[in-house]
């Protein structure tokens, strides 16, 4: 995959178009510029700027709550209780 494809995927995961559409557009342009040049110095300068913008976008991204160990334990406990209830009910 290209740098632009990778950045676009991360921007989507970060919901950057909703939180910071201008910065997201600049990040994508910078990624395309990296893909479009073979000059090492230009790539390095552009990559440094892209890294900075992506760091800012990550800070601005909405926090998504993902399951943790406690959530997994709660889910497993509920499954066990459901099986016990089913067994007790004769099912």
Image (cartoon, rainbow, N blue to C red):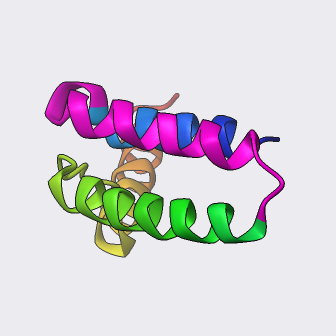
Position in image of residue 71 (x %, y %) = 31, 62
- Give left or right: position of 45 versus 78: right
Q: Position of residue 7 (x, y in %)?
A: 56, 44
Report whether 58 appears left or right of 2: left
Q: Is residue 31 magenta?
A: yes
Relative to 37, residue 8 above or below: above
**Residue at x 20%, y 25% (from the top left corner):** 18
Viewer-nearest residue: 48 or 77: 48
**Quadrant of image for the N terminus:** top right
Q: Is residue 60 left or right of residue 7?
A: left
Is residue 30 part of the magenta span, yes or no?
Answer: yes
x, y percent for residue 3: 69, 47
> On the picture, is 55 further left or further right than 5?
left
Q: Position of residue 72 (x, y in %)?
A: 40, 63
> In which image quadrant can residue 20 be found?
top left
Q: Residue at x 25, y 49 (%)?
A: 64
Q: Nearer the viewer, residue 73 or 6?
A: 6
Per the rendered image, the range of residues in magenta is 17-39
In the image, residue 58 above or below residue 10: below
At horizontal 37% and vertical 54% (from top left) the residue drawn is 75
The secondary structure that most of the magenta stretch takes on is helix
Q: Is residue 13 visible?
A: no
Q: Quadrant of residue 89?
A: top left
Dividing the picture into quarters, in which one does residue 2 lie? top right
Q: Is residue 91 visible?
A: yes
Against 72, residue 1 (above or below) is: above
Using the image, determine if residue 79 lies above or below residue 24: below
């Amino acid at each position: 995959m290209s740098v632009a494809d990778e950045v676009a995927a991360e921007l989507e995961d970060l919901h950057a178009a909703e939180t910071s559409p201008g910065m997201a557009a600049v990040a994508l342009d910078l990624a395309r510029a990296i893909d479009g040049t073979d000059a090492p110095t230009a790539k390095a300068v552009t990559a440094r700027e892209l890294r900075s913008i992506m760091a800012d976008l990550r800070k601005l991204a909405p926090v998504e709550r993902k399951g943790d160990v406690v959530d997994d334990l709660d889910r497993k406990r509920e499954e066990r209780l459901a099986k016990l209830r089913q067994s007790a009910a004769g099912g």
